[in-house]
Amino acid sequence: MSSSIEPSWEIRPFAGVGPVDLRATRSDVQRSLGSSTRQIKKGGSLVPTDVFGDSDIYVFYDDSGRVQFVEVFGGVDVRFKHVPLLGKNLASTVRNLRALGCEPSDLEGSMLCAEEGFVLSLDGDEISAVGVFVPGYYDQLLRKG
């Protein structure tokens, strides 16, 4: 990962996380984060996903080549309203988020903060990844549930 990447990234609901703006182009992201380590096809998408660092940051694009989802597994400290998320205990983090008015809901083993535009992936009781998404990203999935 580029040494110019800030060690702490704040979630900007439905706008981005750290230096990555949702709806930005691939070239905009690469200017912010440096060249991607590699590109992969993930989730059945025909549009390649950029992987940055040592597989710590995945940036997913829509069919028009704009960022629709950013998933961070490590390498940076991801926060929402200054509450640290990544690698933290789920129960205490949920308490802190609720104190801010966020009501995470269970979504197939993840915790979805739909009104704030992010999702927490879990490994047992620990938050293993944080995903930030554009408006409407989870709407179809929620209608099925």
Image (tube, rainbow, N blue to C red):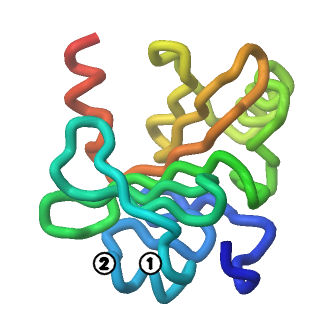
Q: Could you tell me which residue is drawn at 85 percent across and 25 percent down? A: 92
Residue to which mark 2 is pinned: 25
Residue to which mark 1 is pinned: 29
Against 118, residue 19 (above or below) is: below
Residue 6 in picture, x, y percent from top left: 75, 76
Q: Is residue 88 left or right of residue 115?
A: right
Against 9, residue 71 (above or below) is: above
Q: Could you tell me which residue is drawn at 69 percent across and 52 percent down? A: 80
Amino acid type of disc 2?
Thr
Marker count (numbered)? 2
Determine the CA span between mark 2 and mark 1: 6 Å
Would you say the residues marked 2 and 1 are in contact, meaning their CB atoms lie under 8 Å apart? Answer: yes
Residue 123 in picture, x, y percent from top left: 69, 21
Q: Could you tell me which residue is drawn at 45 percent across and 81 percent down? A: 30
Q: Is residue 125 left or right of residue 144?
A: right
Q: Is residue 47 left or right of residue 102?
A: left
